[in-house]
Image: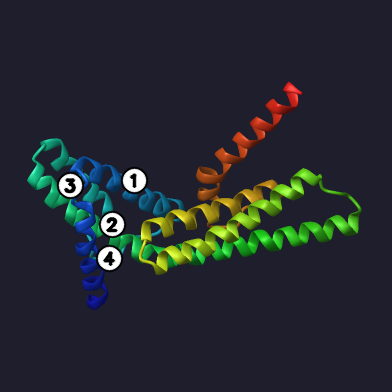
Amino acid sequence: MRPLVYLILLFFSFSLIGKSTLSYRERKKQFDQKISLITDIQDSFSIQEEPGKNPLRTVRTEVEEVYRAGGRAQMEKTLSLAEGEVVYAARKLCPKLEELSADIYQKAQSSYYSLETDEKSSGKKLEWETKEKIQRYLSMAKSEKDHAKDFFLSGNYHMSLHTYKRSILYSLLSLRTQNAEIPEGYQTAANVWAEPVFQTVNQQKSSSIREN
């Protein structure tokens, strides 16, 4: 475990060279975005943080307190440590998101195959637009899942998490479009991530129909 931690911190130290041109306010903004993504994922799947590590919400609070105090030198030091914590947390979270994105994609795909089988046996046809939307969501889910793996292998853990999240979102949208039951363990993500998108798409469709 220790060699892995040292490698991650070493990678992060080298990355600071590229951050030297960023103001600490810009770095704070990027930090906020990254830690918000991690906590959003943790909350959506009830993922516990690693025992013995400083909780990310505590890290965020410490950064906020120093930022409000306004001392630049202390802020940059605190941010550097906090950014290292975020890199480590993202690195540890990626394999879990890889597993979840593959699982929900497989479930959404299997559900669609069952829907097609029922369609053939019953003779009741799905609307072409609905079928096309389901297939498009499944295609996007797979594409994002594959890209997320590439980001992980290149060491871009934030983009890997962001892309795995999109893959899960598209799989959930496919299930929602199928009127299929959301699998156990994905209900919170479905409510928080997918449902607002699904309702927005439907509202836009309804508006378009009324206008025509």
Query: How crowded is the residue under tag 3: few (<14 C-alpha within 10 Å), some, or many (20+)?
Result: some
Q: Earlier in the sequence, mark 2 or mark 1?
A: 1
Label 2 sits on residue: 86
Marks 4, 1: nearer the viewer: 1
Q: Which mark is residue 62?
A: 3
Question: Could you say which is closer to the camera, residue 2 or residue 139?
Answer: 139
Secondary element under disc 2, as helix, strand or loop, is: helix
Label 4 sits on residue: 51
Q: Earlier in the sequence, mark 2 or mark 3?
A: 3
Residue 12 occupies quadrant:
bottom left
Q: Position of residue 146 (x, y in %)?
A: 53, 64
Label 1 sits on residue: 33
Q: Amino acid at mark 3?
A: Glu
* Cα separation between marks 2 and 3: 13 Å
Which residue, as the protein is rendered here, is positioned at the far right?
Answer: 123
Q: Earlier in the sequence, mark 1 or mark 3?
A: 1
Q: Amino acid at mark 1?
A: Gln
